[in-house]
Image (cartoon, grey):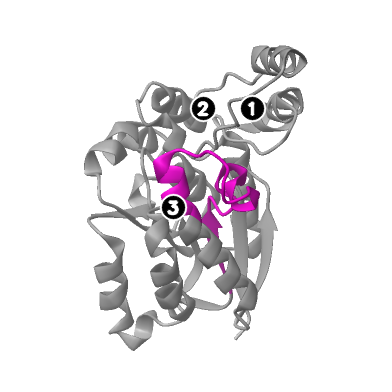
Amino acid sequence: MATVEQPVQQNGSEKEQEQQQQAGRHQEVGHKSLLQSDALYQYILETSVYPREPDSMRELREITAKHPWNIMTTSADEGQFLSLLLKLIGAKNTMEIGVYTGYSLLATALALPDDGKIIAMDINRENYELGLPVIQKAGVAHKIDFREGPALPVLDQMLEDPKNHGSFDFVFVDADKDNYINYHKRLIDLVKVGGVIGYDNTLWNGSVAAPPDTPMRKYVRYYRDFVLELNKALAADPRIEICQLPVGDGITICRRVS
């Protein structure tokens, strides 16, 4: 979702190398991968992801690719990972914060049993409605409770009812990075012990490991600090087990243990 710009000064051989790399870069719109080899990423997609991608998800991915904000979408390999994870943990009651056009939402809906539920929150209904016809055609729209607006007030309202505490099997967060810590403070009480929270973009296109003086776009540098703060907080939180994976733009899986 973010791009760290490389230093400007390069010698001739470095420029040639970069040109060769760019020529071979994976051209998938909305491409997000931390792999150094784009040929390897292409291999993963063509060998393991695209052949297993449901037709509805492929259709939504192609629709989203034409949207000017397509970099915000969940990558196809991450969508596949989320689908398998949901099935492995037997998730039924879930939540998604940050929907965009609904690629990860569709992956979740397809993975849940027919009586599964997803509370899906986003500040932009228009983007969600771009993917809604595909979701409806896939026959899973009945699993989704879409709520337009900021998520924090909804979470606070949920917490007022004790019945909601520990009621969610899985939560996926791919939204405003400056509120990730605030989301975590609330979600840890809403997800059940043994339940899972997935935080997206936790490697922020590699910028988390970049030296402080590395040239970056303004929004990359701004949100980088919030992502760093989240990563540090999750690593120190005794209530969860964590695994940070270089899938997509980095995803941290948190399993609540207490």
Label 1 vs label 2: CA separation? 8 Å
- Which class describes the residues within 10 Å of circle 2: few (<14), some (14-19), or many (20+)? some
In terms of image quadrants, where is residue 163? bottom left
The span picked out in magenta is 195-224
| 54 lies above or below 193 | above
Residue at (44, 69) in percent of width and height? 181
Residue 254 falls left or right of residue 66: right
Q: Earlier in the sequence, mark 3 or mark 2?
A: 2
- Helix, strand or loop at mark 1: helix
Q: Are marks 1 and 2 in contact (CB under 8 Å)?
A: yes
Q: CA distance from mark 3 to mark 2?
A: 30 Å
Q: Amino acid at mark 3?
A: Tyr
Q: Nearer the viewer, residue 127 or 52?
A: 127
Which is nearer the eye, 17 or 175? 17
Look at discs 3 and 1 and give the one toward the viewer. 3
Foreground of the two, 12 or 99: 12
User: Which residue appears at 45% of the width and 63% of the height?
Assistant: 94
Which residue position holds label 2?
A: 58
Seen in the picture, residue 152 relative to 166 is either above or below; the reply is: above
Q: CA distance from mark 3 to mark 1?
A: 31 Å
Residue highlighted by disc 3:
223
At 39% from the left and 60% from the top, the residue drawn is 178
Residue 212 in the magenta stretch? The answer is: yes
Q: Label 2 amino acid?
A: Arg
Residue 248, x across and y down, in percent = 60, 42
Read off the residue under disc 1. Answer: 50
Number of on-image labels: 3
Question: Which element carries disc 3, helix, strand or loop?
Answer: helix
